Amino acid sequence: MATTPEPTKADIRLVIAASALGTVFEWYDFFIWGTLTASGILQRSFFRPGDQSVATLLAWATFAVGFAFRPLGAMVFGYLGDKLGRKYTFLVTITLMGVATAGIGVAPTYTAIGWAAPALILLCRVAQGLALGGEYGGAAIYVAEHAPQGRAGLYTSFIQAGVVGGFILSLAVVLVTKASAGADAWATGWWRFPFLFSLLLLAVSLWMRLKLSESPVFRAMRAAGEAAVNPFRESFTWPGNVRRLLVALFGIAAGLTVIWYTALFSALTFLTGPMHMDERAAQLIVAAGALAGLVFYFLTGAWSDRVGRKRPIVIGYALTLVLLFPLFHLIGHAAGDGAGAPGQVPGAGAVALILFGILGLMALSGLSYGSVAALLAEMFPPRIRYSSLSIPYHFGTGYFGGFLPLISTAIVKGTHDPYAGLWYTEAVVAMALAVTWWGLAEPPAITAAP
């Protein structure tokens, strides 16, 4: 095996910064649809006027379509990442994401072109899903393959935090744009700015990522002529890999994603919907809780470097099963249990309790998600790592998580119980806990030699 120079500390800082910021920008692009769906503006713009409940379900279904195409993106870009390299593959994915997001920002409304409007949006969401299917795996692997021995959990936790960062950035851009433009201007066209803002984020991300070199693991593997011939096929024929794929899908990806979406998107729609809270107040509270909760991701990543990857995830799942309903009931009680008039703004004491509840949800998410990039990168052999990581991750997060807003909203509407949608999260986490407890073995640390 040919040797490759070890990355310097400056190299590693650039790797983490470029990968994490790229992840923030990529997920910003993907989440801005969900953020604006929660505000109601997209329903009024791209879907047939009439029943707002139907329009909301259609908007969340459109949100879910992007997730549905993530596995296909994982297959395509995972294959390219294992064949051509980590760096250039996620340069392509972030470009595709930025262009698709800007496309939503210039798409005509339903009033202008009728059903062609949601059809165009659907195509943009498909492109976003394909792009995201290749982005996460590339960023996670790239950082993990640069990390010093014993630090992969901490270093890759910045990638996990970047996903939350994308959600926070989407809220921040919406809030600043609305405050700057005013309500009338926002409703008549300024809601498009958050989508077009992605072009600036794309330019920054490309500038940073073009400075990067290929990962030392891939360079060593390519120099030795040991790259996979067909990484997609080998992912299913490599000894023991099918079991690892199933554990990664049903044990890791499925569990972490429903906790994540429940902690953030469900909390936001719960406050603005059944709890009748003022939209701006709810967005500020959730954004503040998410920002403060990022510390749990870093702590969990560092902790997993000492105790292993499995223990924090199992603990996070078990605590979720016990604490999910109490935390949401705490948030609901602080918000007045929906008894107030629409648009209510809670007092300081209520805000403190809601923030406490959201921090509790973020702690559960941090435990189950903070070390996952390192875990998944370590689970699979280097020659098929991009494909083998991306496929189960995006099947799990794309279907179990991506359809959570749609499923939980439908459950709530069917039962007229604002808490009933949480049973979907509980069921998936129970399955994930069983699979992880039974099937996950501690993976070996990544080295430069395949």
Image (tube, rainbow, N blue to C red):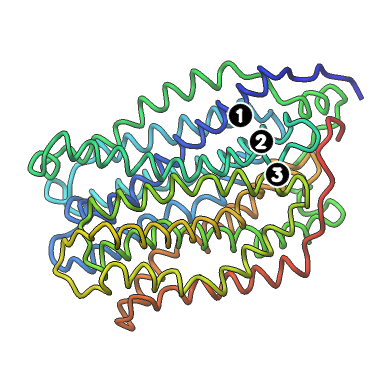
**Does residue 236 appear left or right of residue 45 in this picture?**
right
Residue at mark 3 to residue at mark 2: CA–CA distance: 8 Å
Vertical arrangement, residue 56 with respect to residue 114, above or below:
below
Q: How crowded is mark 2: few (under 14 residues within 10 Å), some or many (20 or more)?
A: many
**SS type, badge 1:** helix
Position in image of residue 447 (x %, y %): 84, 34
Are discs 3 and 2 less than 8 Å apart at CB? yes
**Does residue 196 appear left or right of residue 225 in this picture?**
left
Q: Mark 2 points at which residue?
A: 155
Position in image of residue 303 (x %, y %): 70, 48
Please report whichever mark, 1 or 3, sits nearer to the chain's N-terminal start: 1
Q: Residues within 10 Å of mark 1 (few under 14, many from 20)?
A: many
Position in image of residue 168 (x %, y %): 39, 43
Vertical arrangement, residue 214 with respect to residue 36, above or below:
above
Q: Which amino acid does label 3 sit on?
A: Ala
Please report whichever mark, 3 or 2, sits nearer to the chain's N-terminal start: 2
Residue, x 32% and y 62% (percent of image)?
Answer: 269
Are discs 1 and 2 less than 8 Å apart at CB? yes
Q: What residue type is labelled 1?
A: Ile
**Does residue 64 appear left or right of residue 175 in this picture?**
right
Q: Mark 1 points at which residue?
A: 16
Res 347 quadrant in image: bottom left
Q: Name the residue under label 3.
A: 374
Q: Which amino acid does label 2 sit on?
A: Tyr
